[in-house]
Amino acid sequence: MDNRKHIEVCFTPGEYEYFKDEYEIVVVIDVLRATSAICAAFDNGIKSIIPVSSIDAAREYKEKGYLVGAERKGQIVDGFDFGNSPYSYIKEELKGQEVVLTTTNGTKALNIAKDADTVVVGSLLNLDALCKWLEKQDKNILCLCSGWQDKFNLEDTICAGAISEYLLATGKFTSDEDSSIAAKYLYLSAWDNYMGYLKASSHRRRLKNFNLNEDIKYCLTPNQTDVIPILKNGKLVKL
Amino acid sequence: MDNRKHIEVCFTPGEYEYFKDEYEIVVVIDVLRATSAICAAFDNGIKSIIPVSSIDAAREYKEKGYLVGAERKGQIVDGFDFGNSPYSYIKEELKGQEVVLTTTNGTKALNIAKDADTVVVGSLLNLDALCKWLEKQDKNILCLCSGWQDKFNLEDTICAGAISEYLLATGKFTSDEDSSIAAKYLYLSAWDNYMGYLKASSHRRRLKNFNLNEDIKYCLTPNQTDVIPILKNGKLVKL
């Protein structure tokens, strides 16, 4: 009998319904930029983040006096404090604070996955720490890529492939899904030169047009923090 | 100004809604086995194929006296003449006939795409002929992978990647979407040894369990025919 747990990859929030209920842990990934910004925020000492799906929900929190980040299509939404640039969250005045966040893809994926037993936040920033923690859990794991407006994206897939490859190499995990196999192959062919590889990525090109090269460089630099944000009662907190 | 046309890849029927309306030609791909069987059928001289989405619709045709193929989850549905094995369509008695077909993934994708200007059927069996024809059309092209029960699959993606790579190499086409870039990379890393690569594919393993190795070998052997099936008024015919 095969006692290994599964590590699988779901490419988009839209496909999550065909995966859910089989995985105790869901790792939500939005490399450019929501989950990178969330990791940066906790590394900087933010107390908690409330992820919301809609601009309306974000606005309600804003009216109640919360600090609120809101991003759509790569840009800060008018009337909000910040978007999803990680640099917005590395500020002294945010230490110990609770903030609210809504983004095009990442917070949507977080909310779709919220009924899973355990939901954690993954990015390249916390890759090693996350992999080591996942290895110890002895649970079935799904990497849920946020994608870009419900379409597949490369950077989330490569991050998911990196997590898969780490866990598969321990011998304690197995992968069945074609998406997981593809993610692993894309990661293996990309890692040595992933900045160049991601240059070909449509979303990266989109962000470059907004002069967000510094953000991109930051989000694509692995292992800058050991924090693992986890969803507890609708709020992200540090594990 | 960039006058090149687009060649893009959509991984699943579920994502088609985010792509449609931008492409004059949709190439529907279901390598294991619907679109391979359809190519084999036209190569064998079948007159036309009516693709239907549901078993109920297929049953209605059956009651009217049509020859009807019906497959679900890799197996022939009880009460129907055949499933989607290409070998079922390479029979003398089918020459000149009209048949009805419903399959788990392929006919669903065909019906989702039916409102596009032009819908053609792609597989590894007609790869070269299809690529040469597509090159001449000067239109935006979307490869629509049928996937497996709305999830990504490798063999359709690799076939789509092969089509993309051919068209990109002509210099007349460009790709923007991350899914297209990933398909191309997966094709480039797979082609030299794609049987081995597809051994890792979940769907191939699933078919192997049904003793369908001969079908798989057939479907993965490129360029066995020059036919290009095309959808005209709800029926597939030979172009």
Image (cartoon, coloured by chain):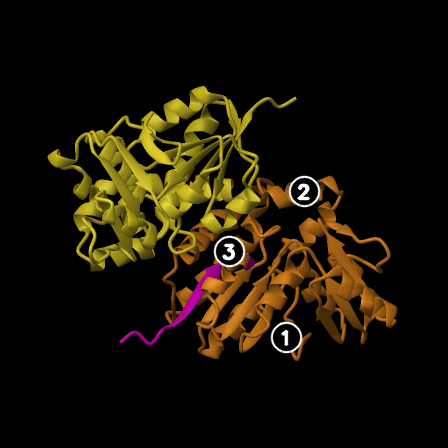
Chain colours: A yellow, B orange
Q: Chain of mark 1?
A: B
Q: Residue at (63%, 55%) from the top-left corner?
A: B221
Q: Residue at x 71, y 49 (%)?
A: B73
Mark positioned earlier in the residue sequence (1 or 3): 3
**Occupied quadrant, residue A42:** top left
In the rendered image, residue B144, in percent from the top left (x then y), is placed at 53, 62
Work out whether mark 2 precedes mark 1 in sequence or the reverse, and give the earlier one.
2
**Element at badge 2?**
helix
Circles 2 and 1: CB atoms closer than 8 Å: no
Residue B206: mark: 2
The residue tagged 1 is B231
Q: Is residue A86 above or below residue B163?
A: above
Image coords of residue A101 (percent x, y): 29, 44
Q: Is residue B19 visible?
A: yes
Q: Which mark is residue B98?
A: none
Chain letter of disc 2 in the image: B
Q: Which numbered disc, 3 or 2, marks the residue that appears first in the sequence?
A: 3
- Foreground pick, B163 / A228: A228
Q: Secondary structure at mark 3?
A: loop
Q: Which residues are magenta?
A: B1-13
User: Which amino acid does the dot numbered 1 rest on?
Assistant: Leu
Q: Label 2 amino acid?
A: Arg
Subunit of mark 3? B
Q: Within the magenta stretch, is there residue B12? A: yes
Q: Which residue is mark 3?
A: B11
